[in-house]
Amino acid sequence: MKKILLLLFLGIYPMWLFSQSKGSIDEGVSISEVMVYSKRPMKEIGAQLTKLDSMALKENIALSMADVLAFNSSIFVKNYGRATLSTVAFRGTSASHTQVTWNGMKINNPMLGMTDFSMIPSYFIDDASLLHGTSSVNETGGGLGGAVKLSTKPARNEGFGLQYIQGVGSFSTFDEFLRLTYGNDHWQSSTRVVYSSSPNDYDYRNHDKKINIYDEDMNIIDQYYPVERNRSGAFKDFHLLQEVYYNTGKGDCIGLNAWYINSNRELAMLTVDYGDDTEFENRQREQTFRGVVSWNHLREKWRLDAKATYMYTWLAYDYKRDLGNGIMAPMTASRSYINTISGAIDSEYFVSDKWLVTASLSVSQHFVRSQDKNIILQEGDKGIVGYNKGRFEMSGSVSAKWQPIERLGLSIVVREELVGNKWSPLIPAFFIDGVIIEPGNITARASISRNFRTPTLNDLYALPGGNPDLKSERGWTYDAGLSFAVGRENLYSLKGSAGWFESFISDWIIWLPTTQGFFSPRNIKDVHAYGIELQAEGNLWLPRGWELNLNGTFSWTPSINEGEPVSVADQSIGKQLPYVPEFSSSVIGRLSWRDWTFMYKWCYYSERYTMSSNDITFSGKLPPYFMSNISLEKLLKLRWLDLSLKGVINNLFDEEYLSVLSRPMPGINFEIFIGITPKW
Amino acid sequence: MKRLIILFLLAMLMSSLHTSCMKWEYGIEEEFATSGDGLFITCEGNFQYGNASLSYYDPSKKVVENDIFNRANAMKLGDVAQSMVIRGDVGWVVVNNSHVLFAIDINTFKERGRITNLTSPRYIHFLSDEKAYVTQLWDNRIFIVNPKRYEIIGHIDCPNMTMESGSTEQMVQYGKYVYVNCWSYQNRILKIDTETDSVVDELVVGIQPAALVLDKNNKLWTITDGGYEGSPYGYEPPSLYRIDAETFTIERVYQFALGDNTGELQLNRAGDMLYWLNDDVWAMSVDDENVPIRPFLPNRGTIYYGLTVSPDNGDVYVADAIDYQQPGKIYRYSSDGTLIDEFYVGIIPGAFCWK
């Protein structure tokens, strides 16, 4: 066993040299995966992870993480339109039940609790993993559905490197990507820029309204469903990511990651909006900076990572109306300023070849100023409706991983959180896995965890509506599953997993209208989410350079309201939560031959109810939909540069579909990409 | 190798064949031919989801038809149905966040026409067949429309409001004057001269007057909600005000407890009984000098969202929005408080309109 550990260490050490956050032990375990699937990473004992490969993340520059998750995982992506808010429902939970980290830093909006995945370009992410249910406790608290772990890593280039990709597509869409890299034995630097813009005025048949034709006496003589443009949906998104790493070559690495976002998006009009789009402006702007300074320290048996982070977000929402004289008067001009300072320490120590202990501690201080409305006070002065609050958060965990024999692993994690001045109850998690049958590497795993999610700052303090008496949401999750992996080098590989999960979440927070006309959050629901998740991936390598890859997911996720009825008339008990599909599935197929790659992406979501009572009315449900995208790519290796040419067809069968009521999605659309990588 | 490629393409094709499974139910118009008395219920739906609806209840048959606008016209009503008024045989449905007023036939529910591009319409008040006022939220103007030509023909500027803090709500008419309560971050009743289409006077009441009615004695009644805790505009106990329409002065103030959930002021046909919500349903004679000690109808363990009184027989209807994400329920009581009927309508039933 010591030899294996030594081999692992030797194997991983060169790779670690430029790893910036997770250090050698993670890298070591990933090497072990290559070793014919015989060694499972100790850190991942009993955990259910979905790792998104680089082909999925780097498929094309126009994709956000919302697009990647939709086609590569069983997560339901609730999409309000192209380049608009995209949130996820992980295992039938709500958007704020999925915790998201970037380079170890939690990036959920502290005001809203959720993360907008449309604001994360997939080209900015080098590693992405989904931690399902209990597995998220290893990483962070509050992931009642799970966690999405995103990170970047050094390019590992020698000398200068440059990559430029230009995309031109339907609806006057332009996507640009530039990456500059420099590297030597000690330094690695990478600058990435993404800029996307589009009027986004795709047309669609609007079946929610009709156009009237009147006679001279204003009697309707005819009506028809109009073909409308997506009105006021333009966007301009700019992202800049700078990374610098310095490696001492003696086991220490210092890194800097700085990510700046400047987004300017119109909020498209609803299908049932009869306003003149030239007289209304509905716009959201965001500027965000996320900076991480990290230090990784590796020794033979232990590792220490330290991080200091600063995050700033400025959010502006403007709703204006033309007064008839060309002047756009503000009806709403809300502004939010979020400053977060945080620090974190993670450590791992191999006590022996059978024991690994880990400990982590993170602290954050949020400062939030939210200005929702400018009003005239009773005395005639001006006033602002909003709040100005800070909140301290601390999360610490310790874990012990034990592999008494090579085929069996046990892990226990205990997490504790402090939010404001309130300690959460202890969050324990227990994991076990074992290889049942060695041929085929058939492995069984099971886990159980408790979890909590504290209300967001808006839940507590928003004006009007904030409810300072809200309780934390709390839950128990149980997981069990089987996985296998078989393969023959350079011929084929096949791996898959089947998992069952069950979650009980109490005091679910929901925002509801009040008699005074505003919304206010309340703890009202107990939810029982359960289901099955299946994943499979196969690779086939054939003579003459042919390669076939198939990747599929399927999930069945009933998410049932089992709370007390709100009133005697309540029909929602025992029903599926709104906007959570019971079934979802995705398939990606890649066929490669020499420098050609053809890809087919397909995803399916079953019917989503829009009412808590699951009533089947015209507006009470959204029909199931299948989505198909294809692409064809050709690489050209020239003397001075590598060229890539790619054509993409989205919504191949021109489906009319909605992810959210009254938010039309685009029909068939096209984009071509040209990539240039000079050879210096 | 060729077989492999063919297999791959076939597999992809098979998955794509499922694309025809997405079904939409478009274009089916249902014929209605109602007669006699009836009650329209506007159901707001969820803000930004475009699932407002209109229900119709026949009190004599105790039969309800839901989603009638959609069923009769094969299109959606829109986003946040706020209120409805009937003039002649035309019903005017105000759909707030769709920026539209629909005119419908009150027997067939078919659309007759629409007025579009309003800012954020709340209520409509008719002065004649060719002139009506439309109040707005987030606009410091009351729009003047021509219902016959479905046109916006002008507006009335409201003093001491910006667009951002603009809020005008319900309207009642006394002589040539229309009175309007100003609700969101406001505390006033405006008096509008309908001959000049201008605000000629205003009266300060409590914080956020939410409703306005005119009784048989020509007294205006308004009920405030008192704002909310932490509001920069102020937070105070809600109150019921009696105002003399002639002199435009406050005659009497009935104060409730801080934090009470007041709203939905209604009168019976005779204009001598006043009803309102304050968790329970309350009622009193317009001539009473004190509010009653006990409610007319105690709460059913929920938050009532809408209220109306039958002009025909004084039956009281209250709306329960339940969790605001499912069809709400209407409870119908006789004038002595006996439950007569109950039925489900659309999401968030907020307002009623008698045919």
Image (cartoon, coloured by chain):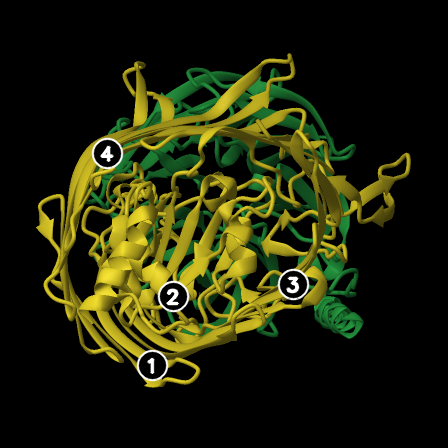
Chain colours: A yellow, B green
Query: Foreground mark, 1 or 3?
Result: 3
Query: Foreground mark, 1 or 4?
Result: 4
The lab-note entry on whether marks 2 and 4 share a chain reads yes
Circle 2: residue type: Glu
The quadrant of the image that shows the N terminus of chain B is bottom right
The answer for which chain carries disc 1 is A
Q: Sequence order check: which comes first, mark 2 or mark 4? A: 2
Residue A541 spot, x, y in % from top left = 62, 67
Q: What distance separates the C-alpha of mark 1 from that of mark 3? A: 30 Å
Q: What distance separates the C-alpha of mark 1 from that of mark 4? A: 41 Å
Q: Sequence order check: which comes first, mark 3 or mark 4? A: 4
Circle 4: residue type: Thr
The answer for which chain carries disc 2 is A
Quadrant in the picture for residue A236: top right
Residue at which label 3 appears: A547
Q: Is residue A657 left or right of residue A102?
A: right
Could you say which disc has been placed on residue A33 in the image?
Answer: 2
Q: What distance separates the C-alpha of mark 3 from that of mark 4? A: 40 Å
Circle 1: residue type: Ala
The lab-note entry on whether marks 3 and 2 share a chain reads yes
Q: What distance separates the C-alpha of mark 3 from that of mark 2? A: 21 Å
Residues under numbered marks 1 and 3 in contact, where contact means CB atoms less than 8 Å apart = no
Residue B271 spot, x, y in % from top left = 46, 47
Residue at which label 1 appears: A444
Residue at which label 4 appears: A248
Query: Residue at 40% of width from left, 24% of height from top?
Result: B248
Quadrant in the picture for residue A358: bottom left
The lab-note entry on whether marks 1 and 4 share a chain reads yes
- Viewer-side residue, A649 vs A634: A634
Q: Sequence order check: which comes first, mark 1 or mark 3? A: 1
Query: Foreground mark, 2 or 1?
Result: 2
